[in-house]
Amino acid sequence: MSSLARWCFRRRGVVLAGWVGGLVALALLVFGAGAAFTDSADLPDSESATAYHLLGEAGGQASANVVRGTIVWHAGEVGSGPVRERVTAVLGDIAAMPGVKQVVSPYTAAGATQLNPGAGTAYASVVLDKAAATEPVVQAAERLRAPGLDVEVGGQAFTEKPAGSNGTEAIGILAALVLLLLLFRSLWAAVLPIVTGLAGVGASLLVVMLASHVVDLAATSLTMGALIGLGVGIDYALFIVNRHRKALRAGASVPDALAQAADTSGRAVVFAGVTVMIALLGMFVVGLGLLTGMAQAAAVTVLFTVAAALTLLPASLGFLGYRVLSRKDRAAIAGGRFPLLPREDGKTTTAGRWADLVQRFPVAAGGAALVVTVLLASPVLGMRVGNADASSDPAGTPTRAYHDLMAGAFGDGFDASLLLVASTPDAASSQAFTTLAHRLESLPGVAHVVSAPARAGQQVASATVIPATTAQAEQTADLVETLRDDVIPAAEAGTGLQVYVGGQTASSIDVADALMSKLPLYLGLIALLGFLLLAVAFRSVLVPLVGALSNIATIAVGLGAVTAIFQNGWGLALLGVGSGAPVMYLVPVLVVGVMFGLSMDYQVFLVSRMHEEWTHTRDSRRAVRAGVAETGQVISVAATIMLCVFASFGFSGERIVAMIGIGLAIAVLVDAFVVRLTLIPAVMTLLGRANWSYPRWAERITPRLSVEGPERVRDEHEMMAG
């Protein structure tokens, strides 16, 4: 690592030109090729996927290759007169548009149930190819608006894709700059971590946009990459700049200080970055292509931020020289006064005094930290995973206006329809399905049932079940479970009938179930990975075990915060994303992957300094204190920066982005101040020398990996030999 830092110092002009030239070249390629994002997620092997496949084989229009939308209007005389004539003409124009497969008007026999004269409301259902452009349809519908005639569009086809973060991350970056100025007392030192982080994130996002042509990536991958990349990128650069400044203030030359920073903090950055990337790529076990693509995009972002911290940052520090220090420090160095560092084993720093307090009362400090962690994580026990619908959107938005108009006339479950698709190989099974459809009319939770007309010789039948509750309501999920587990098996008994429950609502439930069923495996996999990596790095069993368990606790805190705020609605109005709703199924998996990697970062930076001190002194209590005293301030600032960056995404106005941003912000705050700087040192103080115990057989087979640098490894070998 020191060789790379010295090379970047000597060739700093080349390194800087390479980064600038690379960014320009990538930007030109993106300008020419554009992006090709997709928001279509492959359904897992589920009952709803089988329903779509079966109906698609029979030539039905509810296959996975089409989407449905709704145009709803409200007027005094909705069923006759000028309104009917005007709407009928526009619906005819829409039916002739490219990609529109079917338009069912409420003014025809097929759409008679779509008209409610008493409520003055009617709607038309529109079926389109999944690849069809929806803008012309929306524009045609909006032209219907007139005094006394309200028109809204909604449904799957017309649901707007999540937008970007609307620039809210700029607030987090400004807050990060202020914090860095307070820490370093130097504008250049404060700006460098932000510039380095932005360069790494910018290059990675351009690469992601180009990669969208060959890999299925959602548009939200850019926001996810920016959220993760800005947080870790600024942090990684901060740790290196902080170590570089310490070396300068201790009397090292600029190239020597860069080499020292690279051989200590630089190694920790590589270790932490690789851990984050592995945790993200572990999402492959979930088996959902779209989520895997987002994880790949985030991992690419982390890779570029690590590369920027190891190359662009040393080159920039080489250009700046001693200007990364405050004026007072530069004047002292010019006067030949060395070293400038305070005695960090004394009680002059806040972090040192905190370490003393924790070690004086380890049981009380650790117990209090544990209670706080458990209380904040407890809401996760009530987490309900699902897909939020328009009923929870902010009041005044088009989607909420659409929902209110439809629900007022056609019930809450109008947009939560369940599609029953049946294989009816003989007359008996066909009759059994007809009987089932009639029985469903009286089933609790069902508003009404519409059976598709049967065609002669057809061996596939279908019926649409309209629930009495919204798609996100728990009662609707219970209805799907009742149909699949009780009602349908009873109807199939003794016949050749096979019925599958599909539709968008059932598909969302199936995707959520598939993801959540893999979550324990995913969590266990990355926890084991984290344990093994820390065991190899620090030659210990208890240190990685405590680290892995505390990481899981931090993840629970993040998910508990998401549940309390976005599901239970505690303080949700402040974020402008609507009312409480189930936690979107992507969020738990993303929070687990990202937060595990981020909490590993702080564990590595904290414990690496402890391990360095233990290697030199073999005094466990002193090692724990040195780790907290010497890394506490920079970990606190780094966590606060990440809090600002992540929290800024919470005000993006997009529910899924806000969920991840707020969940990570609260988790990283608790992780740094409650877990890493309180719980971990308290537990390690109580464990004493047992922290560093490692079986001899494991020592023989474990590869040697140094986070502290080659000199520390040699010291350890000498200590062990002695």
Image (cartoon, helix red, strand yellow):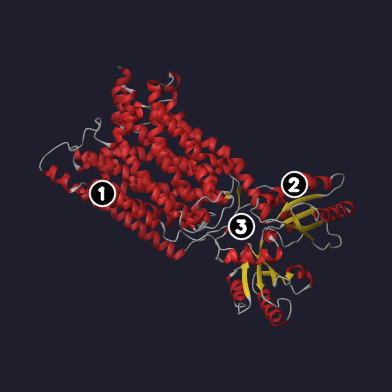
Q: Is residue 214 visible?
A: no
Looking at the image, the residue that sits furthest to the top is: 722
**Amino acid beneath label 2:** Thr
Side of 133 where 34 appears, left or right: left
Q: In this view of the protein, which residue sits in the foreground, 318 or 332?
A: 332
- The residue under the point 49% across, 53% down is 658
Category of crowding for the residue at label 1, using alpha-carbon neighbours closer than 10 angstroms: few (below 14), some (14–19), many (at least 20): many
Q: Earlier in the sequence, mark 2 or mark 1?
A: 1
Give coordinates of residue 485: x percent, y percent: 75, 44
Question: Which SS class for mark 3?
Answer: loop
Q: Earlier in the sequence, mark 3 or mark 2?
A: 3
**Amino acid beneath label 1:** Ala
Mark 2, residue position: 482
Mark 1, residue position: 189
Give coordinates of residue 302: x percent, y percent: 42, 47
Quarter assignment of residue 710: top left
**Amino acid beneath label 3:** Asp
Which of labels 3 and 1 is toward the front?
3
- The residue under the point 27% across, 45% down is 183
Which of labels 2 and 1 is toward the front?
2
Give coordinates of residue 314: x percent, y percent: 27, 46
Quarter assignment of residue 709: top left
Disc 3/disc 2 C-alpha distance (Å): 21 Å
Q: In this view of the protein, which residue sits in the foreground, 7 or 299?
A: 299
